[in-house]
Image (cartoon, rainbow, N blue to C red):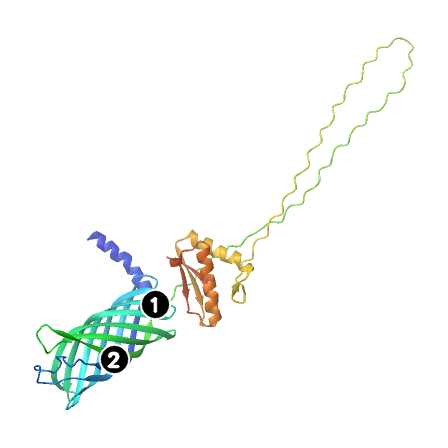
Amino acid sequence: MKKLLILLLLFIPKVTDAWESTIGVGAYARRFNEKDQLGALSKDEGLKPESSAGLALNGSFLCSVSPSLLFGPDLTITYSWLSAPQQDNLQTQSLIAAGNLQYNDNGFSLALKSGFILNSLTAGYKTKVDFDTGFITSVKVGSEVMDSARFYFEPQLVITPSIEAKNSFVNSFALVIGVENIFRPKKKVEIVKVVEAVVEPPKEITPVKLPEVITPVAAPPIIVVAPIVVEPPKEITPVKLPEPVTPIQPIEKPKPLALKFDGNNLSSESIGFLENVVKIHKSIASVIKVHHSRGKNAKKKAEVLYTWFINHGAKKEEVLVVPDLKGKEIKIEVVPK
C-alpha cells in the first residue's frame, strides 16, 4: 500500500503539468443492421431501423503518459432522427462512455477509443419505445486548424444485441465529423542559460637584457731588472647566457554565441551557441524544445536543429519539435524534467 501511494504521488505532477481537455460538436450518422434488436419485438414483428442522422456532442479529459501519448475518459452524446419502413417521427439517442488512448505529433492526432454504448428509441419526441446496450470501438483522426481547435473524423464500429437469439450480436457502422475546442495548461517559463566566455588579452613580454661580455685586456710589457716571479693570470669563467623565452601561443578566440541560418541550413556562426545548449542539457536532467511557427521554412529549420542535436549527444526522446510560435520563427528552450 505504501509503494502504491508513493507511485501515485509521483504521477500527480505529470497529470498537473501535461493534460488535454476537449469539447466538440459534429454531424452524426449511423447505418443500422437489419437484424438489430432496437425497437423489435421478435424476428417478424416490430420496428426495423435502417439509418439515422443527427448531432453529436463530445468531451474528454486526457492525461500525459509520455511526451506524445495521452490517456483518459471520453464521453459522447448523440441525438438523431431515425428512418424505418412505414414509420415516421422516430428519434434515437445514444450515450457512449469510452477510454481514449491518443497520440499527438506536430498538430496531428490519432486516437483509439473503446467502451460501452446505451441506445434509446422515442416516438414523437416524448414517448419511449425501446432501449438496448452494446459495445463500441472507434478510430478518431484529427488535425489542429488553430492553436486551440481541431477538426476530426471518427468512424465507429457498434456491436448491439440481435433479434435472432439470446446472447447474439450484430455489427453496425456510424460516423462522426466535427470540430472541437482544446484546453491545455499554460507553458512553463522559458529557462535558457547563456554562458559568457571572458578572454584576457596576452600580456606584453619585456625582452631580457643580456649581460655584457668582458673582453680580456692585454698586460703591458714588463722590464726585467731582477728575477721576478710572475703568477699566471687567473682563468675567467665564462658567463652562461639565459635561454631564450618560449613565445606564448595566441589564445584562440571564442566561438560566437548566435543562432544563424544560410537559407534553411545552419551557419557556421551557430555552432558555438548550439554546443553551449547541449552542455547545459547534459549538466541537468532536461528536455530540449525547438519551438517554431507555422511557416514551411520555419519547420525545415526546426528539423535541421532537431537532427543537429541528435547527432551531437542528445537523445531522440529528449529533443521535441513544437509548432506553437506566432510571428517568431525559431526558439530553443531547455526545460528541466
Q: Please name whichever residue, 331 or 191, is drawn nearer the observer in this view of the structure.
A: 331
Q: Which residue is mark 2?
A: 56
**Residue at x 49%, y 58% (from the top left corner):** 274
Tell me residue 94's x, y (percent). Answer: 19, 78
Q: Earlier in the sequence, mark 1 or mark 2?
A: 2
Say whether residue 276 is visible. yes
Q: Residues within 10 Å of mark 1 (few under 14, many from 20)?
A: some
Q: Is 260 positioned to the left or the right of 290 in the image?
A: right
Q: Is residue 245 above or below residue 100?
A: above
Q: Tag on residue 288? A: none
Secondary element under disc 2, as helix, strand or loop, is strand
Amino acid type assigned to the residue bearing label 2 in the image: Ala
**Residue at x 83%, y 13% (from the top left corner):** 230
Tell me residue 20's x, y (percent). Answer: 31, 69
Amino acid type assigned to the residue bearing label 1 in the image: Asn
Q: Is 173 positioned to the left or the right of 19 in the image?
A: left
Tell me residue 312's x, y (percent). Answer: 46, 55
Tell me residue 95's x, y (percent). Answer: 19, 76
> Residue 64 is drawn in which quadrant?
bottom left
Q: Please name whichever residue, 308 or 192, is drawn nearer the observer in this view of the structure.
A: 308
Q: Which residue is mark 1?
A: 104
Say whether residue 192 is visible. no
Q: Is 265 positioned to the left or the right of 2 in the image?
A: right
Distance between the alpha carbons at the discs numbered 1 and 2: 23 Å
> Residue 6 is drawn in which quadrant?
bottom left
